[in-house]
Amino acid sequence: MDKIIIEGGRPLNGTVQISGAKNAALPILAATLLASGVHRLRNIPPLRDIRTAKTLLYHLGATFEEGDPLSVHTDSVDGHEAPYDLVKTMRASVLVLGPLVARFKKARVSLPGGCAIGARPINLHLAGLERLGVKIELKHGYVEASAKKLSGNHIYFDIPTVTGTANLMMAAVLAEGKTVLENAAREPEVVDLARCLTSMGGSIQGVGTSVITIEGVSELQPMDHTIMPDRIEAATYLTAAGITRGNITITPCIPDHLEAVIHKLEQAGMEFQISEGSIKSIGAKVIRPIDIKTNPFPGFPTDMQAQIMAMMSLAQGQSIITEKIFENRFMHVSELKRMGADISIEGNTAVVRGRSKLQGAPVMATDLRASASLVLAGLAADGVTEVSRVYHLDRGYERLEEKLSRVGARIKRVSE
Ligand code: EPZ
């Protein structure tokens, strides 16, 4: 296993190239199952989770021509099973459920277990599919789904689930009649998927709002789609500028995707120059404490909670950070405290009392965004930080140490 070694205390300055969005690419790769032919996908990020998704598609019969665009051939797809040994490494594998039942009227997908940040059930995905006429049985740790046909219906999500909205959109797009998804997720990655499905011949209205209407069609055509830039990667680098008091420009990006993060970083004292496809961030000399509650889009993203907490560990005063999406997304706190952060947890709320310094230390990554948080803390800490188990990081950040080195960080990857 690799680890990343950081010598902290240097302000970061320069430009960071942002990759395609992991959480848009994953559902869009699954959507290739909805149509037979050659799909072309551009700006797919070369990440571990993407490789896992491609392995799953290959297991189902798809083949690939590597490159940008990536070509995905689905005319020979004949499988319908997502096995446990794949799903356990990436829960987003459940995104093949909707496309498989829509196209082949059957699917056998391993139930994803919990993960470090929470139980993460898929009950809303399954309840939505049942509303479309899919028979769902849970057998030996697998979801066994089958349907004679899929019929449009009205589906209400108790929680605006991101991949649940994606799964049901992909099922409904080939169902007979109209489907309404109420309390649907509004995340930009869901909008990107809808744009892709529309380009394939789907009929979808209201995406980006909490009520999405889908008119089923009988067949879809292969996609030719460019994945949106990754807003969480972008926000992570903006926060890297904030925590090191440097100036970083990120491009490409879609500023509208980053409004909540920019608003909070401005409250913390940062300034931004925003143009069409790029944002220049100017770090504050003094980091001001801020209160944050994570919420579904357009609220402050849970995927940025760990990263902003690292920055608030160096604020002048006390910040209150409330995690409202996942029940166990404070795994980074104990590691940040080993670096000298003063944080106490009460339920789903963390009280962060800012310190003047953090000390470099050996720390361990536990999940994707917690590992990003530890890297950010290491960039600002006095001395050397060693982050182990960086395979978590590789799931969502392309060449992170290279991108950070380019803007002045003293960071390297070594094999343990
Ligand atoms: C997506 O996960 C993202 N993953 C997550 O990013 C992100 O943190 C999350 O959305 C929230 O924004 C991908 O898009 C691949 P949810 P998802 O369904 O869809 C509960 C990362 O760092 N829920 O919106 O699994 C659930 O337990 C990852 O890139 C149910 O109870 O999240 C959670 O508390 C981590 N039943 C809340 O809803 C369900 O059927 C939101 O979950 C579905 C969800």
Image (spheres, helix red, strand yellow):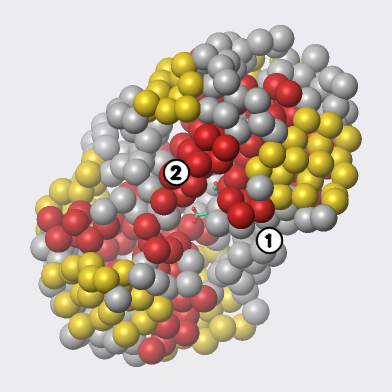
- Measure the C-alpha gap from mark 2 to mark 1: 19 Å
Q: Which residue was labeled with disc 2?
A: 50
Specify the amino acid type for callout 1. Answer: Gly
Quarter of the image with the N terminus is bottom left
User: Residue at coordinates 40% horizontally, 31% vertically from top-left?
Assistant: 227
**Residue 12's x, y, as percent?**
15, 63
In the image, is 398 to the left or to the right of 367?
left
Mark 1, residue position:
113
Does label 2 or label 1 sit earlier along the sequence? Answer: 2
Q: Position of residue 374 (x, y in %)?
A: 35, 73
The total of numbered circles placed on residues is 2
| The C terminus, quarter of image | bottom left
Task: Give x and y (percent) for residue 194.
Answer: 56, 26
Horizontal and vertical percent position of residue 79: 66, 31
- Label 2: few (<14), some or many (≥20) within 10 Å? many
Q: Which mark is residue 15?
A: none
Residue that appears at 38% across and 48% down: 47
Question: Regarding mark 1 in the picture, which secondary structure is present there?
Answer: loop
